[in-house]
């Protein structure tokens, strides 16, 4: 079945143009959900996500057993809960101090 996309000046669509390989690669990675989610992830959690992503690939490639990756994910989950709890506690403390300062200035 022939391509039905609009052709550019070279006679090819963006998906089939031989000169657009790099543009397709950049566009796909820069706009992916994973790339956007990675930017939203707190800096402290990025290394954990990278390790888990590598573990997933290693399970797929047969380098490590699924049980090993499952154990890593379990420990990472506990670590994320600890980090998140600490960050929430810090934010709450900051809010409480701000409220206390606002009351004392009134």
Image (spheres, grey):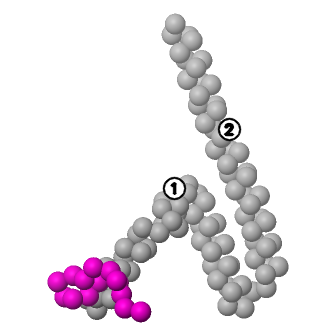
The answer to whether 95 is drawn above or below residue 22 in the figure is above
Nearer mark to the viewer, of 2 and 1: 1
- In the image, which residues are magenta? 1-15
Q: Residue at x 64, y 31 (%)?
A: 93
Q: Quadrant of residue 100?
A: top right
Q: Is residue 81 left or right of residue 48?
A: right
Residue 44 at what x, y percent from top left?
58, 57
Q: Is residue 15 left or right of residue 42?
A: left
Q: Is residue 24 left or right of residue 105?
A: left
Residue 18 at what x, y percent from top left?
28, 92
Q: Secondary structure at mark 2?
A: helix
Q: Residue at x 63, y 38 (%)?
A: 90
What is the CA distance from the residue labelled 2 to the residue labelled 1? 20 Å
The answer to whether 42 is drawn above or below residue 95 in the figure is below
Residue 89: which numbered mark, if any? 2
The answer to whether 40 is drawn above or below residue 61 in the figure is above
User: Is 49 included in the stretch rendered in magenta?
Assistant: no
Q: Residue furthest left?
A: 9
- Residue 3 visible in the snapshot: yes
Report the predominant secondary structure element of the magenta stretch.
loop
Residue 52: which numbered mark, if any? none
Q: Residue at x 61, y 36 (%)?
A: 91
Q: Say few, some or many: other residues with alpha carbon within 10 Å of mark 2 (under 14 / 14 to 19 / 20 or more).
A: few
Q: Secondary structure at mark 1?
A: helix
The residue wearing badge 1 is 40
Residue 22 at what x, y percent from top left?
32, 83
Q: Residue furthest front?
A: 1
Q: Residue at x 64, y 66 (%)?
A: 48
- Residue 22 visible in the snapshot: no
């Amino acid at each position: 079945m022939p391509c039905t996309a609009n052709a550019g000046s070279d006679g090819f669509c963006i998906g089939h143009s031989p000169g657009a390989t790099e543009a397709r690669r950049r566009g796909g990675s820069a706009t992916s959900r994973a790339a956007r989610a990675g930017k939203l992830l707190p800096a402290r959690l990025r290394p954990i996500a990278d390790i888990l992503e590598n573990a997933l690939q290693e399970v797929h490639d047969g380098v490590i057993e699924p049980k090993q990756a499952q154990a890593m994910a379990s420990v990472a989950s506990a670590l994320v809960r600890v980090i998140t709890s600490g960050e929430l506690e810090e934010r709450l403390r900051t809010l409480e101090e701000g409220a206390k300062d606002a009351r004392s200035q009134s």
